[in-house]
Image (cartoon, rainbow, N blue to C red):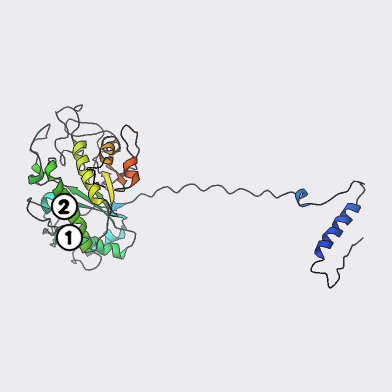
Amino acid sequence: MRLRFFLPRRGRGRGLGGLTAALAVVLAGCGGSSAPHTLTAASVPQPKLPRPKPSAPKQPRLGVGLTEFNANLLNHGATPPAFAPWRNKVEALHPRWFRLIVQWDTAVPSPTAAPDFAHPEDGCVRGIAPCAPFSGVRALLQAIASQQRAHPGQWNLLVVFTYTPAWAAIGAHGCEPPHTEPRARPIDTEALPGYRNLIRSLLAEAHADGARVDALSPWNEPNHPSFISPQRSSCSAHSPLLSPAVYAKLARAARDELAGTKTELVLGELAGKDAPSPLAGGGNPCRMPAAALGPAISRPASPSAATTRSRTSPPRSTTWRPGSPRATRRCAPRSTCAPRCWPTSRTS
């Protein structure tokens, strides 16, 4: 049996409600049961749709970069012909980061001299040809700027300072290796304004050269006696470390100088050491910024203050945004802190 329903021509638009009622009546009158059967929305089973599985959070990528001291290998564009093939190989690496090491004693040899970032370099590799002179840090910054323009998102610049000028260093004391140079000794507290001026001048030089400084590290390998000496008050692996307090002074000064800029503060830059020694710090490379430096750096300095050497294990660093709440909360005194750690220097 077929049932057909014809709606009046005039009432087809509003006759659907009647059609629904008619269907309900027909369905109720069919079948062998005397009990009425009514079809409602609640009686229709809902289809079970599979729930989408939550996607796993993306893991951070390794930010591979390089350190190079010869500007002739870094220019995007014209470069001396003898360096061009090797420059092309450097560009083919597509580094996300470039680590620029700035020697304070070279840039500011005397307390009365303004920072000079155009110190002439012969362009050789330890005196071996080919050679092509260039203007020190200034030429390196200009070369990095050319790469940043040519390759957006790559060649992010990390600046690292090292070597205290003799006029800014304190005298010999504690446990030092033989023939320690004055430039390896800690900075005198009275020379901290000169250190802050170095940072300020470097950022101004980079801006003038068109380079973007994405991150800055206060000091290179502060747990190594070649860069901060002495490391300990006496020649025992268990004697108190002096270097964390020295490094914390530099880090606080850098934090205050970078406040209000877009440059990240990188803490650590530690030399990999498997165990403590009389002449150097050691242990977990990630522990020094967290346990020793965090509490000191998180305190303002004043009420108004707002990769390529072989090591036994990779040096580590952690990044904090200067002046941000995170920078003051991450390592509160007596807390256990686990900052992001990443190697910034490793032999390939």
Q: Nearer the viewer, residue 134 or 87?
A: 134
Residue found at the very far bottom of the displayed protein: 9
Q: Is mark 1 on a helix, strand or loop?
A: helix
Task: Give coordinates of residue 309: x percent, y percent.
Answer: 22, 45
Question: How many angstroms separate mark 2 from mark 1 (CA)?
Answer: 17 Å
Tag 2: amino acid = Asn
Q: In which quarter of the image is the N terminus?
A: bottom right
Point 26% across, 40% down: residue: 299
Side of 52 where 295 appears, left or right: left
Estimate the x, y position of residue 323 in percent, counting from the top left.
30, 48
Rendering quarter of residue 303: top left
Q: Kindly tell me whether residue 319 is visible in this rendering.
A: yes
Identify the residue position indicated by label 2 in the image: 197
- Label number found at residue 253: none
Residue, far front: 303
Front residue (pair 108, 84): 108
Is residue 307 among the parts visible in the rendering?
no
Mark 2 nearby-residue class (10 Å; few <14, some 14–19, many ≥20): some
User: Which residue is under mark 1?
Assistant: 138
Left or right: residue 299 versus residue 106 is right
Percent position of residue 334, x then y: 32, 31
Q: Quadrant of residue 246?
A: top left
User: Which amino acid is tagged 1?
Assistant: Arg
Residue at point 11%, 52% (across, down): 106
Instruction: Establish if 11 lies above or below 91.
Output: below
Q: Say which label, 2 or 1, has the lower sequence index.
A: 1
Q: Which of 111 and 230 is in front in this view?
A: 111
Q: Is mark 2 on a helix, strand or loop?
A: helix
Question: Residue at 81% across / 64% down in the picture?
Answer: 16
